[in-house]
Image: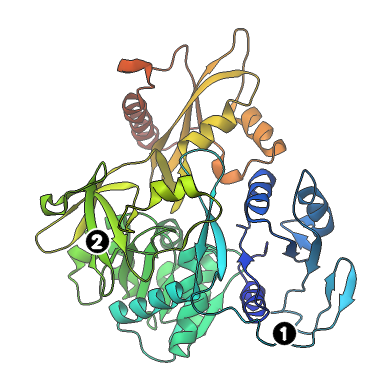
Amino acid sequence: MLLPDGATAHAVYLANEKAGLTTVGLGSRAGSAEMRSIIERTGASALITQATHRGRDGDALYADLGGRGSTLSHHVVVPAFEFDPEGDITVDGRCVVGSGPPDGRRIGPDDLFMVNSTSGTTGMPKCVMHSQNSKFYMAKLARQVAELEEGEVILGGAPIPFGFGLFTTHFLPVLLGGTAVVMSHFDPREALELIESERATVLVCVSTQFKMMLNVDTFDAYDLSSLKVMFTGGEMIPYRAARSFEERSGAKVLNFYGSNESGFATGTRSSDTAERRLRTGGSRLDGTEVRLFDNGVDVTGSGRGQPGSRGPATCLGYYGDPEANAELFTSEGFVLHADIVEIGRDGYLTVVGRKSDIIIRGGKNISAAVVEESAMSHPAISLAAAVPMPDRMFGERVSLYVELRPGASVTLAELQRFLADAGVSKEVFPEDLVVVEEIPRSSGAKVAKGDLRQDAARRSIEAESKGSTVR
């Protein structure tokens, strides 16, 4: 399924569920190389699109993805049901009329409901398997921690097919008998308008999105009095921005600490103090266990380590990837997270570092290794090292340090065009390029990522003091 974040995507999930089909969700911004990898790994047999996708003809896109050993054999084109509920549906160019779902085929609560992708530490994204029960559990916990009632109006800003956007706008409204308000793509001014016009009571978005809303010059002119709570996640909450959102909107900011694979491990509650809600990842949730590990050894009693969680929100594993599953799960079935955290005596979790080499941009995990591998396919680049650069809006941006081949040159714009032509997802593009004679090394000849992070942070501060943006 390759669709924008409108009502049509939710209708397709439901249709596939009734037909007994597993949905493989492709991110709407994914590049062709990423999409091919996911299609081939999962063995997906049909591609569902609208007539066009992000300005590209759907048939041409299918033809592009259907080659090179792809398993695709059908192209299903659906209308935008929210605007054209009686529009034609075509399969391989032929108009079809639905006759209802086949008997006995419906997806069960513990069956493989959907597969979506996550950024791995190396190579192409991994394919994460989910059941419906895991998402309904997450929806129930969201209702519990936010003290939600029947008939809530939920404005979804977090994108589907990723877990956060899916359980909050596909499952939670059903659980509450409420209304989901969705947009084909996030626009901060439109989001504020919808909160006011639809009397939204719950907002779902990542940190970058609510910071964009705060930056709307007429923010305080909108009537946001209906809003009770905002769910955010994907990264630690930026304290000042979250505090400002609470004070100016009147809504409480809540978050879950987790991942695509774990669902979540901890969360904050409406009953928590503002300091706990805005400065921690919350405490353990009913039904989920949390432990701390150090190189596979359980160190829960120490209060610091790599967190692992186990419970109903846990995914079914990676599709067709036993080696990755062996790294993801402990022998007791705990999903390991990519951070180093501290858990205080009060049970509240705080992230203090990272276990994996990832960059979190606007709530999206980006593998530094994938950025580096993509960049080094450029003929001018002999070595590349990607690190996070602090950023007020997105939390972090992708900064890339490169060594060039003798006599070669490359600019950021040239590199971005090269990656676009290669089908690399735009989210993986470097946004800051530094050409150096030699990338610093640590002992063992490894790239000294710590030195590069410090340099990127320094340049970010200098640029901010001058009122400019590093590029």
**Kind of residue at badge 2:** Val
**Left or right, 315 with reference to 53:** left
Q: Give the residue furthest to the left.
A: 345
Residue located 37% across and 82% down the image: 225
With respect to residue 437, does 357 lie above or below?
Answer: below
**Left or right, 438 with reference to 296:** right
Residue 150 appearing in the image: yes
Give the structural element (helix, strand or loop) at label 2: strand
Residue 469 appearing in the image: no
Residue located 43% across and 60% down the image: 206
- The residue wearing badge 1 is 102
Residue located 30% across and 83% down the image: 147
Image location (x, y in percent) of residue 431:
52, 36
**Left or right, 460 with reference to 123:** left
Frontmost residue, 140 versus 464: 140
Give the structural element (helix, strand or loop) at label 1: loop
With respect to residue 122, does 258 lie above or below?
Answer: below
Q: Nearer the viewer, mark 2 or mark 1?
A: 1
- The residue wearing badge 2 is 290
* Marker disc for residue 2: none
